[in-house]
Image (spheres, coloured by chain):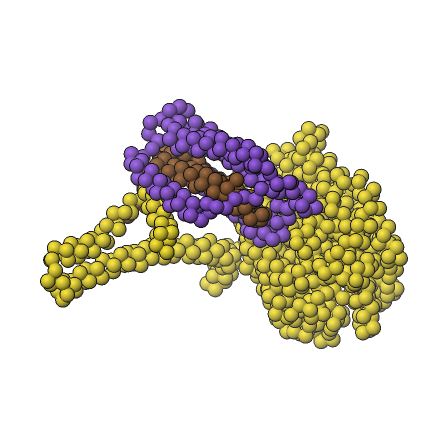
Amino acid sequence: MTSALLAQEALSNAEIGIVNGFFAVIAVVAIVAALRMVTTTNVVHAALYLLVVLSAVAAVYVILGAEFVAATQVLIYLGAIMVLLLFGVMLTRAKIGAETDLDHEQRWIGALVAVGMLAVMSYSLWEGFSDQELPTTLAPQRTQEVSDAIFSTYIVPFEALSVLLLAALIGAVVVARRD
Amino acid sequence: MYLNQFLIFAAILFCIGVYGVLVRKNGVLVLMSIELILNSVNINLVAFGAFNGDIAGQVFALFVIAVAAAEVGVGLAIVLLIYRNRRSIDVAEANLLKG
Amino acid sequence: MFAAEAAETAVPWLYENVWLIPALPATSFLLILFFGKRLPFKGAEIGITSVVAAFVLAVLTTFTWVGDVEGGNTAYGTVKVADEKHSDEEHGDDHSHSEDEDHGSSEEEHDDEEHDDEGALLVDGDGGDAQPIAFTAGSLAAVEEGDYEPRGAAVVTEVNWFESGLNVFRIGTLVDGQSVMMLFVVTFISMLVHIYSTDYVNGDRRYTHYFAFLSLFTASMLFMVLSSNTLQLIVGWELVGVCSFGLIGHWWEEKPNSDAALKAFLTNRVGDIGLLVGMSILFFGAGQTFDIVEINTKALNGEISGTVTTWAAVCLMAAVMSKSGQFILHTWLPDAMAGPTPVSALIHAATMVVAGVYMIGRLYGVFWEGFSIFGGTLNLMAFIGGLTTVGGGLLAFVQRDIKKVLAYSTVSQLGYMVLALGVGAYTAAMFHLFTHAFFKACLFLGAGSVSHACHHSFDMKADMGGLRKHMPITFWTFIIGSAALAGVPPLAGFWSKDEILIGAGVWPGTGGNGTYLIPFIFGMLTAAMTAAYMTRTVWLTFFGEYRGHDHPHESGRRITVPLIILATMAVFVGFLNVPKSFVSTIGLPEDWGLLFEEWVEPAGQTYFPFDGFTHAKPSLSLAIVATLLATGAGFLVLRYYQALYRKDPMASEYSDGLRARNGLAAAGYRVLENKYYLDHLYTGIIAGATKGPLARAAYWFNQNVLDGIVNVAGFISVRAGRFIYYFIDQGVVDGTVNASGRTASGSGQFLRRIQTGQVRQYATLMFGAAALLAAVFIFAV
């Protein structure tokens, strides 16, 4: 019933090395794709780069043992949200192809803010968690546990969320409809 | 596996997302960058969940995904509305709030 | 059967499987949706078959129920089938094969579960004893008190729907007199409306869609009627609302129709908030349960405190006001006549609009305690009911549209039912609901038939008149329906209305549960008004000379046969609940009296008011007075129109009538014509008042507070600069001071410059500030 059944033996060092190697590859791919996404001059390409980033994030979830979240990520982000974004691209008649005029002139301000934030965050993370390691017995958590948590402890946020979704649905229809 | 490798990875994605929000003029691209920011937050939630052996991290990651879906829906509706009214989705041109 | 062994009486198969009745039209809805268009009759045949089957089952259930009540054989208690797989009864047909096989194993599970959930399931909280004890034990207690011989205990069949933490949410059916009565009414009227519709909406561009929605509506209404817990009740309640929305807006291409649908939906949302809040109050007040029987029991034996029941009752009353068209939220109901006429007959006269009345009856224990109905003189429910019944009746006088007359008449009659419940006349209210369904459906379908003949016009003054010669069947059925509505003895409406009037307990010798003088006066007024406006309607439609063009013609058989059936019912259903004294006077056995009361009212049960609950005694004098009042009013109106006819056969109103001569009458007419200005109040004043001032308040806040802060900041800085300059810093370099002063005085201007309207710059500022703040916290703190 509990995760005790699923708990694996602690990973050996070699196995941890392999996982870390995977993570490194995924992280590099994700960061490069994300950078390309915010710099490319082609809207459709940006969407495709976002696709890569989202898939990489899903892979990171798998490494962290959150398989249900990974599956949801694939279904909702890659399936639904990406389609929605592509619709957005299409409906606003963006050029399929390179565009010169996608960024502001003063890019450096944005870059400055972003780098500043990164510096602050990296420093604080380094200070706070540099010696913390994830447990080596990291096991995939069962979907049942997730659902138990959602539908018992977190039932009220869940219901609130469903109301939010309804409101967003109606709001989107009201905002976007033509009359 | 250090906790930090995930957290810093998430921080990098977050800042790239912030950069995208700040410099992009196209409304849809801004929305994409916001998705990136939300995803990096999710990585944090899941990583801390794994670190503490607590299911709550995953639960809230799922909640964030649901909220993101709502956000994209409303956001795209707004972008479409701006496009319909101004024939352009350049967020720089939407400056009616100018004081 | 497990439950059978425990209770030592076999629960009739029909009670346990009564879910089949809503499941049939639900299946039909899906079938019509997927295959309807390809069938020879475009899906109508599926709808009719399913509803006829549902009707047959409902009739069988009714007979079983009546047999049980008569035989005193109803102590079945609850049947709880703990089978998680059967999550949704609406789609029960998919599971029907597996159901029987699963029974054997599920019963063992059932036993275990009872032990596990002992704390959560208070109904059978008797140490895991699988035999549910609440009702039987409670009834026995009532017997010892010597109030009533208990009868008609509810039979609850439930399965687990889902579990969340300690709460088990169940879905199931509750069979008792009230639900069986509604099953019969809903399936019967729905069946006739289905048949009628095949002719009436024939050739419509959304014919299949129409029948799909009719099926869905029937299913949802039956689902709501059978619900065993409040959660399910809410689900059914919302489902019928959605169907109503869809059917009002059936011809949505025309703006008024889609507006009417939206109005109905939104007005109902207002009340639904009350429903949700009220049900939540009850859920927590009754110790986290949705069970209707349990909530009522606890409300009546005082386990729920009086304050809680009062607040719950007030909140639920808001829901009743919106759904059952009670005064001030009734405005959607007349507009709902934009839908096809058979829909008006089914939904906006006979079934859905009585959902509110039904809900009061379902949770009568809560309302009984909440409004302290016993021994009172006036309460919120009786007052709202009374106001509605008079207000709706008055409005019916000024309508040109025959359907609107009937709509306001429905509002008025629903007010009558709520009034009856408010004064404690439960049976009278349910009986009026029952009889009203038949004659009002008859009237609506008659109006549809008339409009069918008059080229789809509903305007009585412009396009009707003299139709009695052209459409005799419609005429006679309409006359019977009107007479029943007006309370002409011995038709159905007379008996039910009379019971409500005696139930108010004002007339000498009637007893009752209190002395509700004001509701009684309202009721008498309405009795007179109903007869008057129905006479007006009948005259304008069927007498005089025909004012329309072309030749009207009698409708086809598929329209007239339902009319005849309904008119027959309107004549005879009243005899189901005649006073015992009347029965014995005319030489029949006394058992033939008050049958309806015996069948429907769960007297002596713990979940039904038993402490102090009394029935009013019939009064011959009151019946005579009320009848004279009604016939007198009707006669006066008749004379008025006869005089008009002699003057000008083609006229539909006096050109120099009271309105032209008397300013007060004209003003009153204007108020009525504008429906008491309620719509103006809602759209103009309430909506306008919230829109405008909100914007203005925001603007004011921006202008005065925000700008003020900026200005004050600048001002203070200048002052500070001067202060420093003059008194302290004379010796220091002047330039510094001057610069600081200038910067400060410019700060207002500077802050203004930041407001570029560029979201991007705001975001940059925000993120930059966040990073800066984070850095401050990290490094400085």
Please state which of residues A168 and C561 is positioned toward the viewer in this rendering: A168
Which chain is purple in the rendering? A
Which residue lies at the image location 37% right of the left edge and 27% below the top edge? A41
Q: Colour of chain B?
A: brown
Can the viewer see residue C339?
no
Left or right: where does residue A174 sit relative to residue B23? right
Q: Colour of chain C?
A: yellow
Question: Which image quadrant for residue C91?
Answer: top right
Which residue lies at the image location 66% right of the left edge and 60% below the top edge? C288
Residue C666 location (% of width, % of height): 48, 60
Which residue lies at the image location 84% right of the left edge and 54% below the top edge? C3
Which of the image's four quarters has the C terminus of chain C? bottom left
- Outermost residue on the top side: it is A97
Left or right: where does residue C246 sit relative to residue C195? left
Residue C565 location (% of width, % of height): 76, 47
Residue C357 location (% of width, % of height): 66, 58
A10 up-or-down from C406: above or below: above
